Every structure is written in C-alpha cells, then in structure tokens.
Image (spheres, grey):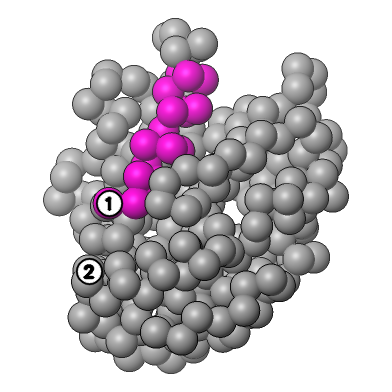
Amino acid sequence: MILQSLAERQRQPEWMDEPGIDAAAHAQALEGLRRINGISGAVGSLFAPIRSLARERPGRSLRVLDLACGGGDNTIALAERARREGLPVRVDGCDLSPQAVAIAARRAAERDLQATFFQADALKDPLPDGYDVILCSLFLHHLEDDAAVDLLRRMGRASRSLVLVNDLIRSPLGYGLAWVGCRLLSRSPIVHFDGPVSVQGAFQLPEVRALANRAGLEGASVRRSWPERYLLCWRRPAGPPPAR
C-alpha cells in the first residue's frame, strides 16, 4: 500500500464509473460493495434522523429517495429497518446504471419490499417531487466541488423535510481502512482500485460544511461516523419550499 498525499482532493476516474463496464465484473463489484456497506454502519447513521422524523408525524407515511443507489444496499436495508420497527416509511432508489437498477429491484422483490427502483441521472435529470427525505451515500466524492454544490442545492429544493449525505472522509485512517477493507471483503479488482481512490477524492469535514453553506443548506449538521465517514443532515425550516 502506497499512502498518497491527502492534503488536497485528488480525483481520479473510478472503474465503476466507466461506460460499457463488463456486466459480470460490475455484478461482482456490487456484491463486494454490499458486504462493505453491511459493516459500514451507514444504514444506522442514515436511519436515525428518518426514524425521528417518522415519530414526529404519527399516522403519516414518509417517502424516501436514495440517489445513485447502486445495487440498492442502503435502500433495501433502510426499508427493512423501517418495516422491522413498524414505521410507515417507503424507500425508493434511482441510479444511472440499468444493471444496478435491475439488481436492486430483484433484491427488493425477493424480500417482499414495496420499493421502486428507476433509472435516472442524479446530476442531469430533475429530482422528482413528493419525497420527504432525499439522501445519497458514497456519491458526493465522485463530484467536482461545483457539481457537489449543485446537487446539494437541488436536493434541498426537492426534499420536503430532510437532506442526508453519508460519505467517506479523506484521511490517512480512511485510506488505510479502504485499502485493507476492500481486499478483505471483496475479490473484485474494481473494488480494490476504487476504494482507496474514493478516499483520495473525498472531502474533509470543513470542506463538507463549506459545500453545504454554498448550496444554501444553512444550519446543516456534519458529524463524523464510523468507520471514518460523515453524515450531513439538513432539515428544511418551517414554511413553503422554495421555487424550483
């Protein structure tokens, strides 16, 4: 393992993002990410504010949209958590990759979850109306700063109540965990390459706060979560949503 300088972001193209990726290799990579997501604690971090919002509104159902959901790991886990706790929460997901959408839809059907998965480009397509919570996980680090600000701004305008972002922290510890963890939990060369590269392109906490402020998400909280991730949480102030 060669530890790269992490003082500044160093974005590189990730293999998972390459057009025309081999279907078998893509499926293997998504399976590796499923195992990584399973032990990351991301679902617990994301579900806590969703649970709080649901309990504030007894008798009302919540709709949640997971942007760039990949194989639906977090989407499905959030839906299962809500069902287990008896909360009226429906979680849908969208992704640019039709293969990822098909895999996520199949996995949700196998678990008898009422979740809808659809193909969409989170950076170019209008975000759909009607969702109380809009979230993304392990997506923001793929973006240039201006694109990240634009996405956060559009998430804030489209969401009725909450914006949630879970992602990596750029740090030596994060890089080491990614390098070791990706090799322990997956045989996919794509995952082995993309994991450490993702940390090099990730944000540090002050940078995330600055992005949120630029996006108009004043008052957003940004806190560290295990293992070397952060959760950005912004709640819409009382009043009508801004014009889109």
Q: Is residue 169 left or right of residue 21?
A: right
Q: Which residue occupies 26% across, 36% down?
A: 80
Task: Please check the rendered image and state whether residue 42 is part of the magenta-colored stretch, yes or no.
Answer: yes
Q: Examine the residues drawn in magenta and state their main secondary structure.
A: helix
Which disc, if any, is residue 185? 2
Instruction: Give the quarter of the image for residue 219.
Output: top right
Is the residue 158 above or below the residue 191 in the image? Answer: above
Residue corresponding to mark 1: 39
Dot 2, crowdedness within 10 Å: few (<14), some or many (≥20)? some
| Magenta stretch bounds | 39-54
| Quadrant in the picture for the C terminus | top right
Q: Earlier in the sequence, mark 1 or mark 2?
A: 1
Q: Is residue 66 left or right of residue 87?
A: right
| Quadrant in the picture for the N terminus | bottom left
Position in image of residue 37 (x %, y %): 32, 56
Position in image of residue 69 (x %, y %): 43, 58
Q: Which residue occupies 34% across, 51% down?
A: 40
